Amino acid sequence: MKFPENFLWGAATAAAQVEGGYLEDGRTPSIWDNAPAEKIRNGENCHVACDFYHRWREDVALMKEMGLKSYRFSVSWPRVMPKEGKVNEEGLKFYSDLVDELLKEGIEPLVTLYHWDMPAWVDAYGGWEDGRITAFFLDYARAVVQKLSDRVTYWITFNEPSCFLMNGYMQGVHAPFKRHYLALPKFTKIFMRTNAETVKLIRKLAKKPPKIGLSFAAGAFIPKEENDSASVEEARKKTFSKGMGTMNNRWWMDPILLGKPASAYGIYRNGGKRVKDFKCEFDFIGINHYEAFNYSLWGGDKGIDRSKLRQNSLGWVIDERSLYWTVKFVYERYRLPVMITENGVSLDDQPNEKGEVNDTERCCALEGFLYHLACAMNDGIPVLGYQHWSLMDNFEWAEGYGPRFGLIYVDYKTGERTLKQSAYRYKEIIATNGEGV
């Protein structure tokens, strides 16, 4: 089938992972800039990253060459608000210029307000464990919306709260590298309140009618028998109640999308009456998806021999069917249009002697994921767009620069960009509007 004529074929990045320029033009450090060397593989950092801050015009030209219809990027909070109460106009100008260039090239900007790069000065107050962060974030969001909303329609409030809160404040594997398990109910409620107030702020201040969503780290269990109704219902139930189905899906989606508490570990105990205040007026659900929950090391199906399955360079199992079931189960529960805000595979890409990057595995995965997304759309599920993760190779958080997710190969020593085989394949898919995937 063909995709809708207005389908947003795009790619995504995050400021901390690509921009660099971490102390330039008034910016101050984020919690990731200040990450201890021993917390990042090979002691690497994101101070330069892909140098997008200086090479963004070149990168927009590459987006146009690929035929992208949209580009999802995040705004760096410490670039816009380098210290408490101070708006950095130079930082805002950078994003304003980027939006202008994208629109000039016919590329729709999708703006994410928070993709994990909390300013160090906010962390000093306690970050997501201190209620003052709500006012700090609203000050920042207000500045961005007032500057960009005359040209930007699509807004994503937060990227993957399950990851930046649980990995950063419970598991201690992401910045700010804390292990405060007992603070889980507190920082979850602070986040929920901040998100709800941010949505209200965008609705109030946006100069163009906004379309607002949040990017969830969503997934699903693939039914053991995909044509058996009982098996499908069992998978649906587990998708919102077992292991990662609770931690990544229901825990966050039910309060935000339904205004109902998720009965998990007492997190909303004694706060049920307030949960309705966390419900947001969203226009779409952002889905970031990489791996089926069947293969999760926590709460997944037992007896799976992962060594016999296709895996990416991070060890995540590649099973493209999972995108269909994720979109299906999420839509049928929450009944909002879907935007795929991240999806892709990491590989150990390297140029050959001709300088070409032949990432055949990524091409196959891309085609497979898009085929199953088309199947979901054929079932009548409204899907607004697909943002491939990632536009370019980048700083993969605690994994450093090893994993490569990009359609564009980045030589981190020189900054040189090279379109991979997958970029050319994606260009063909976009040119035919997905016909034949």
Image: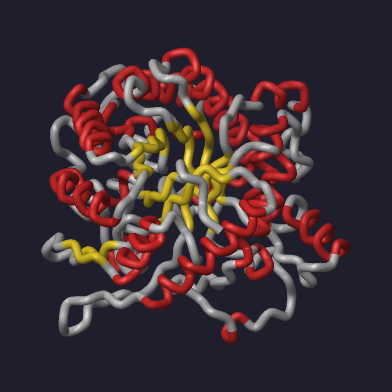
In this view, the residue in front, 260 or 379, is 379
Residue furthest to the top = 204
Residue at x 19% of width, y 49% of height: 61
Q: Position of residue 270 (x, y in %)?
A: 78, 27
Q: Position of residue 85 (x, y in %)?
A: 31, 17
Q: How is the image coloured?
A: secondary structure
Residue at x 63% of width, y 50% of height: 248
Residue furthest to the right = 230
Quadrant, the N terminus = bottom right
Among the 4 quarters of the image, the one containing residue 358 = bottom left
Is residue 329 visible from the viewing direction of this image?
Answer: yes
In the displayed structure image, the side of residue 47 where residue 277 appears, left or right: right
In the displayed structure image, the side of residue 402 where residue 172 appears, left or right: right
Is residue 40 visible from the viewing direction of this image?
Answer: no
Q: Position of residue 306 (x, y in %)?
A: 60, 80
Residue at x 71% of width, y 22% of height: 274
